[in-house]
Image (cartoon, rainbow, N blue to C red):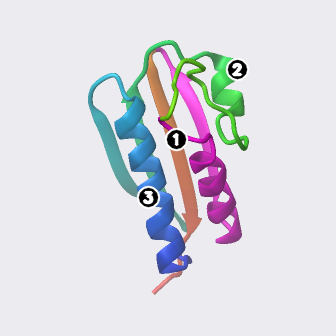
Amino acid sequence: MIAEQKSLERVIENLLSNAIKYAKDNVDISLEKEENRALLKISNAIVNLTLQDVENIFERFYMADKTRSGKGTGLGLAITKGLVEKMNGNIIADMKGDIFNIYCRFRTIKE
């Protein structure tokens, strides 16, 4: 994978922290190889998340749960997206039923 270690650690920490704070129950994490890319996928069941929330989830200061107070600043996923993109990766989110997914892809180096 082409990534800077500290930035990659911050990305993983932010994604896991977000999932643990807001997941309804279990958090699923997988790392797979796709041709010349590594795919990190984090999935968790959610409550009260809308498609609009998913579309805006990486925006600075956006907080899907407007009732949260003191739980966050709405910066974690925006910072994560910036770091992923600086490492020439991409990050997207989607929702399938009541499962929220975040996908991070990074280019790999052939050995």
Q: Percent from the top left, x then y, of residue 67? A: 54, 18
Residue 91 belongs to magenta span = yes
Residue nearest the viewer, comparing 109 with 65: 65
Q: Residue at x 54, y 71 (%)?
A: 7
Left or right of 66 on screen, residue 19: left
Which segment did they paint magenta? Answer: 71-97
Tell me if residue 66 comes above or below residue 61 in the rendering.
above
Quadrant location of the C terminus?
bottom left
- Furthest-front residue in this view: 70
Q: Residue at x 34, y 38 (%)?
A: 20
- The mark that comes first in sequence, 2 or 3, is 3
Residue 52, labelled with which disc? 2
Q: Residue at x 38, y 35 (%)?
A: 21
- Furthest-left residue in this view: 26
The kind of residue tagged 3 is Ile
Residue 12, labelled with which disc? 3
Which residue is identified by label 1? 102
How packed is label 3: few (under 14 Cα within 10 Å), some, or many (20 or more)? Answer: some
Residue 3 makes an appearance in the image: yes
Q: Nearer the viewer, mark 2 or mark 1?
A: 2
Q: Are marks 3 and 1 in contact (CB under 8 Å)?
A: no
Q: Are marks 2 and 3 in contact (CB under 8 Å)?
A: no
The kind of residue tagged 1 is Ile
Q: Residue at x 52, y 27 (%)?
A: 69
Residue 34 makes an appearance in the image: no
The kind of residue tagged 2 is Gln
Q: Percent from the top left, x then y, of residue 56? A: 71, 32
Disc 2 to disc 3, C-alpha distance: 24 Å
